[in-house]
Image: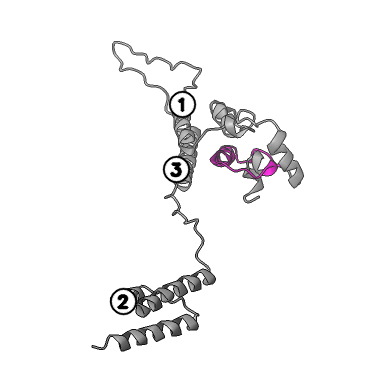
Amino acid sequence: MVGTPAYLAPETYTRSEYSPRADIYGLGCTLFHALTGTIPYESPAMIDLLEMHVNAPVPTLASRAPALADLDPLLARCLAKQPADRFASAGEFATALAEAQKRVVKGTPAARAKPAATSTPDQTPIAAATPPRRALLLATLIVAVMALAGVLMLLLRPGPPAPAIDPTPPPDINSLRAQAMAQLDAVAQALDTGDHAGARHLLAEVVVPAGLPVISARREALAARLRALTPE
């Protein structure tokens, strides 16, 4: 297990499987902490903290910061116990977070209709109230978490495919020795039959493995014999 326990997804505690949705859980914990000043689950005992992440109900923003209740559906999805119930990617999370930011800053919850602007013959339309300072602070925090989500998207982006590995094992020294000896036998046979041109061609193809002085000495002996039989 690697990471800060207060931000680790439940599956990190219960099994070794990992997916990007575990990072979505961590982002949810970070957003919760940024908005409320406290982490979702707190306990001085590690075993109790583990139990909370795995089994305790997802805490709500409404219980700690009622003005932020509109963000509870988004947080609930980030902090879902089952990975399949969370956002599938940092990009999907960032999109939902941007939409939630717009609703909170404008003060228009999803379930509430926007108030219509009013006007009089002698007045210009009355605009909606300026967002409170708390909403602007909230917007700043959300933008920061969105930036973190963007970094996560870059980190989780698939890299280039790994180079293919040749499954064929390299030949062992005995195989190389046998191959070289067979080539030298062919050279000797060509010399015995007077095929000097063939012997020269076969000798050029002989590969002497490193660390086999006997093979090297025999090749040199056959080369000397060929030179003797074909003086310039």
Work out whether mark 3 precedes mark 1 in sequence or the reverse, and give the earlier one.
Answer: 1
Q: Looking at the image, which is closer to me, 45 or 104?
A: 45
What amino acid type should be assigned to the residue bearing mark 2? Asp
Residue with the mark numbered 2: 195
Work out whether mark 2 precedes mark 1 in sequence or the reverse, and give the earlier one.
Answer: 1
Query: Residue 46: x percent and y percent?
Result: 74, 46
Q: Is residue 21 left or right of residue 92?
A: right
Residue 179 magenta: no
Q: Looking at the image, which is closer to me, 134 or 148?
A: 148
Mark closer to the observer (3, 1)? 3
Residue with the mark numbered 1: 103
Query: Residue 187: x percent and y percent?
Result: 38, 76
Q: Which quarter of the figure has residue 10?
A: top right
What amino acid type should be assigned to the residue bearing mark 1? Arg
For mark 2, give the secondary structure: loop
Q: Is residue 131 above or below residue 50?
A: above
Predominant SS of the magenta segment: helix
In the image, the segment drawn in magenta is 13-42
Residue 35 magenta: yes
